[in-house]
Image: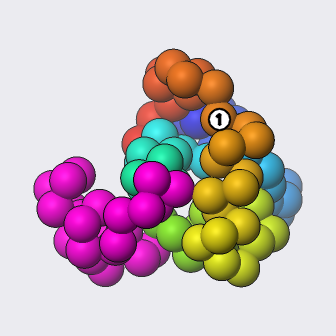
Amino acid sequence: MSTQSFSSTWRTGTRAFGWDSLTRAELRVARLVAEGLTNRAVARRLGISPHTVDTHLRHTFTKLDIGSRVELTRYVVLHDVPGAGEGREAA
């Protein structure tokens, strides 16, 4: 997400939703969860804390308006395009 779109999003009080609103970090976590990894396994794989994985998942669930890992897996299968979004800023 560019600095300009980030600041304008917060200035106007609107929030981004949907697959394209996910940060690179959220996408990485979502993809690994969709492969069946636990939060701890995702954390080990990415070299981050399980708490950080949980935070990324909560943000992802909110942005996608979903409530479970099963729904997340379905969303990833339907919407993920390999290599897409790799230029986004991690947050």
Give how far across and how far down residue 71 sits, in percent: 71, 67
Q: Is residue 42 above or below residue 38?
A: above
Instruction: Reply yes or no: does residue 11 show up in magenta.
Output: no
Is 91 on the left-hand or right-hand side of 44? Answer: right
| Residue 40 lies within the magenta run | yes
In the image shown, does 8 or 63 lie closer to the viewer? 63
- Residue 44 in view in this figure: yes
Front position in the image: 84 or 12: 84
Q: Where 55 falls versus 16 (above or below)?
A: below
Evaluate whether residue 21 shows in this view: no
Residue 8 percent coordinates (x, y): 74, 44
Label tally = 1
Q: Is residue 44 left or right of residue 9?
A: left
The residue identified by callout 1 is 80
SS for dot 1: loop
The residue segment tinted magenta is: 33-55
Please name the residue shown 55% across and 23% down the image: 82
Residue at image x 43%, y 62%?
A: 36
